[in-house]
Amino acid sequence: MDSQYIDHAMVLAGILFCLGLVGVMVRRNLLFMMISIEVMLNAAGLAFIAAGSAWGQPEGQIMFLAVITLGAAEVAVGLGLTLLLFRHHNSVNVDQLNQLRG
Amino acid sequence: MQQLWLIPCLPLVGFLLLVLGHGRCSRSVARLVGVGSVAMAALVTLWVALDFYSPGAAQSYQVELWPWFSAGTLEVSFGLYLDGLSLSMLFVITGVGSLIHWYASGYMWQDPDYQRFFAYMNLFVAAMLMLVLADNLVLLFLGWEGVGLCSFLLIGFWHQDPANGYAARKAFVVTRVGDTAFAIGLFLLFRELGTLDLPTIMALAPEQFVMGANRPTLIAALLLAGAVGKSAQLPLHTWLPDAMAGPTPVSALIHAATMVTAGVYLIARTHNVFLQAPDVLLVVAFIGLFTLLISGFTALNQTDIKRVLAYSTMSQIGYMFFALGVGAWNESVFHLMTHALFKALLFMTAGSIILAMHHEQDIRSMGGLRRQLPVPFWCFVIGSACLVALPPTSGFFSKEAILNAIWQLPGYGPWLWAGGVLGAFITAIYSFRLLFLVFFGPQQAQPHEPKGWQFHPPLMILAALSLVAGWFVLPTAPVLPASPAGHPPTWTMVVAITMPLLGIAIAYQVYVRHQWQGLRLAQWQQLRQFLFQGWGFDGLYKHLLLTPFTTLARVNRNDIIDGLPKLVIGISRLLHGLFSRLQNGQLRFYIATLASAAIIVLALALKVL
């Protein structure tokens, strides 16, 4: 990949990250929040790949593998917690799950 | 000398047995343990004395029991020290102590807390023996505080009455003032001499201290403050009359014969320090003189039989301090011994009278008891004769020796002597006023004399001892410096014998024949009230110390110093309230905060802002 495309890739990654962040902040449903987190993780992954490709270094791809692994683990734990919360409260609305307030 | 440790140990074991067996042992067992332990200690004292007097025996020895603690260069051992002075005190404590225990076993028989009483009494005897046998000043201080504690416990023995508890607290707090000074004196002494071992101090003090310099003067003054507190001398004397709230045997043992003389013992024990501070010795003499005169005048006006005796005790200890101050060390300890005998006798006789009168202590409602109570009457006569120093009783020998030594003090000796003789004159008046009011005149109530082997024999033994003790020779001569040699003119002796007789004659005229009523203070109501209340010392201390203290406490109810910690607490509370608002449980709020903080940090890092 030519280094001139890195700017495009970075802008795309930034847009994806912001979309994910806004999604996490505005959605109330836990499932959608987790999907938004996945989008943010993949945006970061895209930035790593683009940067690695631009400089011809393998670390970018290695980091992406780490990000995928992290994402898989997060989904596994997060979905389990979501399932339990749903069973317990019969809801996945985070605004109602506020018992841990100071 | 191996058996010396048994002497303080036996009463301590008695105390432990009585405490551990509390509620389980019967009265007769408690009596056996309580009286037996002290009597055994007296027997061991005799045994020790036989060793001590045997030809070729050491004149003083130290028995190291075990090391107590060490800190830096301070090595304190649990060790006993016996010499002529401590042996004399041992005789008094165990001898008079066992007679008083014997008497108390009958006196307290009806009391529901019989076992507790003997537990305290045994603990007291153990602490007192520790005090006089200690070979270092730390151990002496342990005994010193121990007797103070037992005094507190026994004054407040009948704690159901709040007044008794008040008297106990007063005694404890007032003596604590002196004890604090004593402790500071010990620290200073250690700093100067590097040791608190008594024989070493006695050897080092004349070498290390410059005569009359600041340091020995300060140390001696602090030790004197301790002695003054314990011995109820001016200005820390106010607790002793109130201490009469305790049972009468307690007054006899603690507040007449033994504990209150601990101050005299302390000064005699550390005489080498005091000899390096002639100014303090002079103060000792004047404290003694003022105390003996002031308490003598106060005793003239008291109406409670025990309070008369309490003021008389203060006055007699004043004589001992007087003697110490003028360098009559041996005479002072001799007077201590004779006083212990006759004052214990007087107190125990007073106890018999109080029991006979159904716990009435006011002498105005007694009278004419001479025929109903013949044994207490004669014991009281003997005790009073000793107290006013009529020849040939023991009091005569000891007081005469003190007065002779005072006369020979260079300079103002004769003036001090005149003060002492005036004191003897007053002593005669108040003692025989008491005797005449109680035993003569019209009979006002029908007494029931307590009889039995616990009441009369101890009184009779003490009376006999009081009569003959003048011929005893105490083994203090090798320990204490000799008083100035020489004899005062013969007329001083004649005066010293005549004054008490004159006093008795006046008391007879006023209180038996009811003449010379002008001498009674009844018409000077305010003066009488002033003397009755002990020269207003209680009021003075109330205004000088108590009122400012309580006012300060009331003003400063919300402790000013506490403001600083409270400020810290307040700030923490405020921040806590602020930050706990952030923990609102809204996940999306957290995320928004996190994101905006990340953006701000990023912006700062990129120097956009």
Image: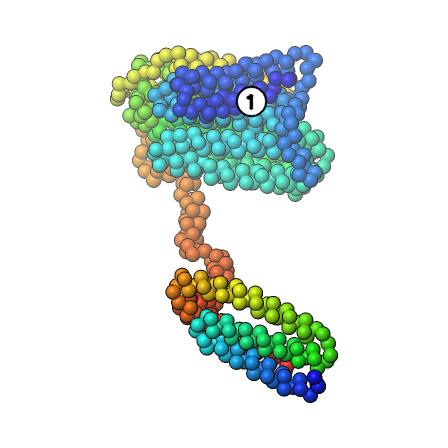
**B447 lies left or right of B173:** left
Q: Nearer the viewer, residue B228 or B436?
A: B228
Look at the picture and state if B525 lies above or below B406: below
Q: Nearer the viewer, residue B514 or B555?
A: B555
At 44% from the left edge and 61% from the top edge, which residue is drawn? A84
**Total marks drawn?**
1
**A61 lies left or right of B436:** right
At 36% from the left edge and 36% from the top edge, which residue is drawn? B163
Q: Quadrant of residue B266?
A: top right
Q: Nearer the viewer, residue B507 or B186?
A: B186
Q: Residue furthest front?
A: A1
Subunit that carries the residue with mark 1:
B
Image quadrant holding the N terminus of chain B, namely top right
At 45% from the left edge and 47% from the top edge, which residue is drawn? B545
Q: Tell me the SS state at disc 1.
A: helix
Residue B287 at what x, y percent from top left?
A: 52, 36
Residue B366 at what x, y percent from top left?
A: 30, 23
Residue for badge 1: B9
Estimate how packed mark 1 is, as few (under 14), some (14 to 19) or many (20 or more) residues with alpha carbons within 10 Å.
Answer: some
